[in-house]
Image (cartoon, rainbow, N blue to C red):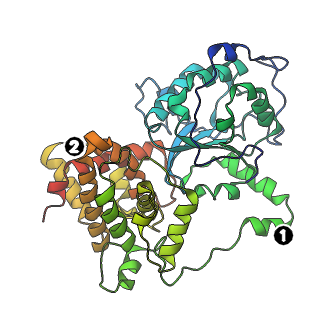
Amino acid sequence: MSSDLLVDLNDDLGVDAPSSNALDQLKLSPMGDKLWPPDDSSMSKSETDISKRLGEGSHLSWDHPYYDIARHQIVEVAGDDNFGRKVIVFNACRMPPHHELDHHKLLMYLKATLDQYVESDYTLIYFHNGLTSENKPSLSWLRDAYREFDRKYKKNIKALYIVHPTMFIKTLLILFKPLISFKFGRKINYINYLSELEEVVKCEQLVIPTRVRDYDEKIRASLKPSVQAQMSPPRSPPLPNQQFGVSLAMLRAKSSDNEAVPLVMRETVAFLMEQGLEIEGIFRRSANVTLVRDVQHRYNSGEEVSFSQMEDVHLAAVILKTFLRELPEPLLTYHLYNDIVNFHSKSGELSLTLHTNMLAMLPEENYASLKFLIDFLVQVSAQSEINKMNNTNLAVVFGPNLLWGQDAAMTLSAIGPINNFTRTLLDQHYMVFSP
C-alpha cells in the first residue's frame, strides 16, 4: 500500500466541510471544466463493463427514479472489510460517456446509497482505472459534490482507498487540497495493486470490473519476478487450534464436548449479552485494527481471550462479525444462496413455511449456530430504544455476513434480498426456530 496521504483508522473527522465561500473560491483554471489532462493509463479508450442488455445489472425496478443510474453498476456495496466496516465501491470504468449519464442524478443516487450505511463505520473504495476524457465529470461537478457530502457522510468514513491512481487523480487531490481537511486527508490511501487491497478487504468479495483486473495484471507483469513473488506470498497452513477460516464441521469435530456452536461465537455473545445490549450503535462501529488481529491470533493459537480486560465492547462485536465473514462457507450455506437471493418477503404462514423449509436443509452445526445468533440478536433488538439497533438495522449489518455467493462477490442486487431474509428471521424467530 503506497500513499503520501496516510489513513488514521482511529481518527474521526472532527471538522465540518469548508464553507460555501471557500468552495466558490476554488479555481477551475487552468484545467477548466472540459480541458482535462490526459490520463496516464495505457488503457485510454472509453471502455466500460456495462452490460449491453439494458438493466441487466440493476437491483431496482425499471420504474424506480434511479433505475437508469443503478443499471450501470457504478456504485456497489460489498459487505464488510477486514475490520468490520461496510464497503462502498465506486467504479469509474462503468461511468458511460457524458451524454449518456445524468451526473446530478448520479450524485443523488450515491447519497441515497450511502444514507443506508453512514450511521455505521464504512470504507470507500474507488477504482480509478477507466476514467477517460469521455466520461470524466467536470471539476465544477466535483466541487458541487464535495459541498453535498456534509459531515453526516464524512464522520464515519474510516478510509478512502484510491486503486490504481494516476498522475491525474493525484493532481486533482492537490487542486482540492484547500477544501480537504487535514484529518480527512489522512484517511486517503493510494493502492497501486489489487494485492495491496487484500490488506483491507478480500478482493474475491468485490465485483471488480474485468477492465480493472486486466490493467492490474498488465502492470504486475511489468514487475521483476522477485517483486511479483513478494506481492503474492503463499498462504500459511491452518494452526492446530485455528478458529478463524475453518469450517463449522471441523470446529465441531475438534471440540472436546462436540459443541455445535463455535467457541468464538459463544464467548463473544456471552460478553455482549452482559456488556453490549445497551451500547448505542453496537455492531456499527469498527475496532482497533491491531487489537482485532491480536484477538484472532490468540484464538488461532489456542490462547484464552478475555474481552472484559480489553475495555472495548465494539471489539467483541467486530470479532463476532469477522468470524462469520471468514467462514469458508457462509452460515446459510451456498446451497441456499439462490433460494434466498430470489426470496421475496411474504406474509403469514407462507413466509413461515418457506423459512422453515429452507433452514431445515442446513447442516446441524449451521442450524444450531444460526439459531444461537438469532436468539442473541433478538435480545439486542429488544433494547433498540437505547442501542438504536432494531431488526432492520441488524439485518443490514449481519445479512452480508451470513450469506454470499460461491464466487464470494457481493452486489446490491443480492444484498437487498439477503437483508430481507435476515430481517424476517428476526421478525419471526419465535416461530421459525420453534421446536
Q: Is residue 30 left or right of residue 295?
A: right
Q: Is residue 292 above or below residue 16?
A: below
Q: Quadrant of residue 357?
A: bottom left
The residue that appears at 84% across and 69% down in the rendered structure is 226
Disc tally is 2
Q: Secondary structure at mark 1?
A: helix
Q: Which mark is residue 346?
A: 2
Q: Secondary structure at mark 2?
A: loop
The residue that appears at 30% across and 48% down in the rendered structure is 278
The residue that appears at 51% across and 69% down in the rendered structure is 296
Q: Is residue 69 left or right of residue 98?
A: left
Residue 291 drawn at (x, y percent): 54, 62
Q: Is residue 376 above or below residue 92?
A: below
The residue that appears at 62% across and 25% down in the rendered structure is 146
Tell me which amino acid carries mark 1.
Ser
Residue sitting farthest toward the bottom: 256
